[in-house]
Image: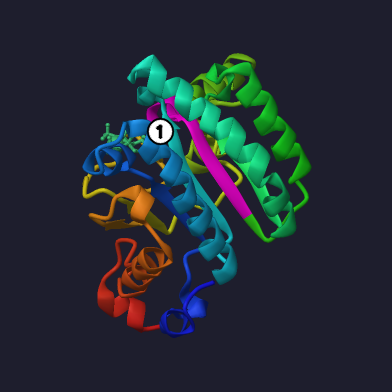
């Protein structure tokens, strides 16, 4: 539940349609309390639940969460295993809640690389929730922006090779539709926690005109209020898309 006073500050007519989050800082959060990094990941799940609840309550249509990057495969095997186990357990446990709240689960990324039990659990929940239409929750798993763009270029090349497409027909629409994110609007708002001010190979193509909100809060501490503050920050921005401020004021 969002505090009514906080909720009243958010303009429901100017909500982002799509919010993407780089959930960062689990390891540092755990270290700060003298625990192993995995402890931070476990607590990060609570913040995931809270973000999903907040987005659903406000009526945000799409929420993309960066859960595991292509580069994260370079972490110690012990940590990778713990993250994969956490993923399976969380998806299994949360599926009834997703159903209850009308949330459709989808994934982007090279999910073929995930362990078999992870893939199966994900597939089951994706299938089960596919007709839900209140919000689409997109988990980025074994994902990176460059990986997706390379895959898209490969697919487009195959279409050209087969004569289905001419090189000069390639435009933004063609590239867009070859990406894993083809079915979603571009994120209006990108949030990154933990104080790092970088993109870390997240939605490179899609964030061309996203507003970016950086917060020092570590992911396990990221709560309803932090999410609402990011939305208020978003609503304070003037999105010009290359135009002048004056142009936006004249209809
Ligand atoms: C984000 O927290 C979770 C994943 C990348 C899977 P980190 O594990 O990156 O935590 P820090 O950044 O090391 O504190
Ligand atoms: C980005 O966080 C990836 C995810 C949140 C899943 P990282 O912690 O992996 O990013 P860097 O290494 O600090 O750039
Ligand atoms: Mg990190």
Label 1 Cα neighbours within 10 Å, binned few <14 / some 14-19 / many ≥20 = many
Q: Is residue 167 visible?
A: no
Q: Answer yes or no: is residue 108 visible.
A: yes
Residue 43 place in picture, x, y as percent: 42, 45
Q: Is residue 220 magenta?
A: no
Look at the picture and state if 100 lies above or below 109: below
Residue 208 in percent (x, y) is at 35, 49
Q: Looking at the picture, tell me which residue is in the foreground, 114 or 198.
A: 114
Q: Could you tell me which residue is drawn at 26 percent across and 48 percent down?
A: 194
Q: Residue at horizontal 30%, vertical 40%?
A: 30
Q: Nearer the viewer, residue 136 or 216?
A: 216
The residue singled out by tag 1 in the image is 145
27 vs 73, nearest the viewer? 27
Q: Quadrant of residue 40?
A: top left
User: Residue at the location (26% across, 57% down)?
Assistant: 215
Q: Position of residue 178 (x, y in %)?
A: 56, 33
Q: Tell which quarter ligand 3 is in.
A: top left
In magenta, the rendered stretch is 136-149
């Amino acid at each position: 539940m969002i505090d009514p006073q906080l909720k009243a500050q958010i303009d429901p007519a100017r909500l982002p349609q799509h919010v993407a989050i780089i959930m960062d800082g689990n390891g540092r959060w755990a270290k700060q309390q003298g625990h192993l990094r995995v402890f931070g990941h476990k607590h990060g799940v609570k913040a995931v639940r809270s973000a999903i609840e907040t987005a659903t309550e406000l009526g945000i249509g799409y929420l993309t969460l960066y859960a595991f990057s292509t580069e994260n495969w370079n972490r110690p095997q012990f940590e990778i295993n713990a993250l994969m186990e956490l993923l399976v357990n969380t998806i299994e446990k949360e599926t009834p809640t997703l159903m209850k709240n009308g949330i459709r689960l989808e994934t982007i990324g090279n999910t073929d690389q995930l362990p078999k039990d992870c893939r199966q659990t994900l597939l089951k929940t994706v299938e089960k929730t596919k007709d839900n239409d209140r919000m689409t929750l997109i988990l980025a798993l074994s994902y990176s922006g460059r990986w997706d763009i390379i895959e898209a270029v490969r697919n487009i090349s195959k279409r050209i090779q087969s004569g289905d497409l001419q090189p000069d027909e390639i435009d933004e629409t063609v590239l867009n539709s070859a990406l894993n994110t083809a079915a979603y609007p571009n994120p209006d708002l990108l949030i990154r926690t933990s104080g790092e001010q970088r993109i870390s190979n997240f939605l490179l193509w899609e964030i061309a005109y996203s507003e970016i909100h950086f917060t020092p809060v570590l992911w396990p501490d990221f709560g309803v209020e932090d999410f609402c503050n990011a939305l208020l920050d978003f609503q304070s921005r003037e999105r010009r898309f290359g135009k002048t401020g004056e142009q936006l004021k004249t209809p």
